[in-house]
């Protein structure tokens, strides 16, 4: 069973920052584009940020551009989401996703999620 393990969520005041981490099994990490998604209560899961396998191309949802930064450390098999200037509307469960190409087939793996709550 492939497990992606997120950490770093918590309660933060508006304007604050958090750094989310996602540890990925080595055998899929180098073969995967990685993404962060989030799901707020009563809403559909939405894509927040994506980074390619080389780590030299990122893309962000309009709602987080200029505030969130996604990165990957290929030596540690870990991806990060630096979230700055957080707003109450950023409150959600954040999920890490790996889109892997293995043995000629595409696979998608998910973490269990980490809660981010932005509130005063």
Image (cartoon, rainbow, N blue to C red):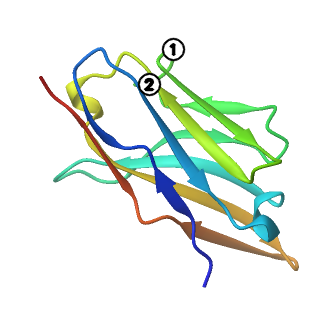
Neighbours of disc 2 within 10 Å: few (<14), some (14-19), many (20+):
some
**Residue 27 pos. (x, y %):** 81, 70
User: Would you place residue 38 above or below residue 63 in this image?
Assistant: below
Left or right of residue 88, residue 32 in this image:
right
Instruction: Answer whether labels 2 and 1 touch (C-beta < 8 Å).
Output: yes
Left or right of residue 19, residue 39 in this image:
left
Q: Quadrant of the N terminus?
A: bottom right
- Secondary structure, mark 1, is loop
Neighbours of disc 1 within 10 Å: few (<14), some (14-19), many (20+):
few
Q: Quadrant of the C terminus?
A: top left
**Residue 25 pos. (x, y %):** 71, 67
Q: CA distance from mark 2 to mark 1?
A: 6 Å
Q: How many marks?
A: 2
- Secondary structure, mark 2, is loop
Q: Residue furthest left?
A: 120
**Residue 58 pos. (x, y %):** 69, 32
| Residue at horizontal 59 percent and vertical 48 percent from the top | 35
Q: Which mark is residue 78?
A: none
Q: What residue is shown with label 1?
A: 66
| Residue at horizontal 20 percent and vertical 27 percent from the top | 88
Q: Which mark is residue 64?
A: 2
| Residue at horizontal 82 percent and vertical 61 percent from the top | 31
Which is more toward the observer, 100 or 75?
75
Which is more toward the observer, 112 or 36?
112
Q: Residue furthest bottom?
A: 1
Which is more toward the observer, 46 or 14?
14
Which is more toward the observer, 119 or 88?
119
User: Would you place residue 5 above or below residue 82 in this image?
Assistant: below
| Residue at horizontal 85 percent and vertical 42 percent from the top | 54
């Amino acid at each position: 069973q492939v497990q992606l393990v997120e950490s770093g969520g918590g309660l933060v005041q508006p304007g604050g920052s958090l750094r989310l981490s996602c540890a990925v099994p080595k055998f899929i990490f180098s073969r995967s584009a990685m993404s962060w998604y989030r799901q707020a209560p009563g809403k559909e899961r939405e894509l927040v940020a994506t980074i390619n396998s080389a780590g030299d191309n990122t893309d962000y949802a309009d709602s987080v551009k200029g505030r969130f930064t996604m990165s990957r450390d290929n030596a540690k098999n870990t991806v990060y989401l630096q979230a700055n200037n957080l707003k109450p509307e950023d409150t959600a469960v954040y999920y890490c996703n790996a889109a892997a190409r293995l043995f000629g087939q595409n696979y998608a793996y998910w973490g269990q999620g980490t809660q981010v709550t932005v509130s005063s």
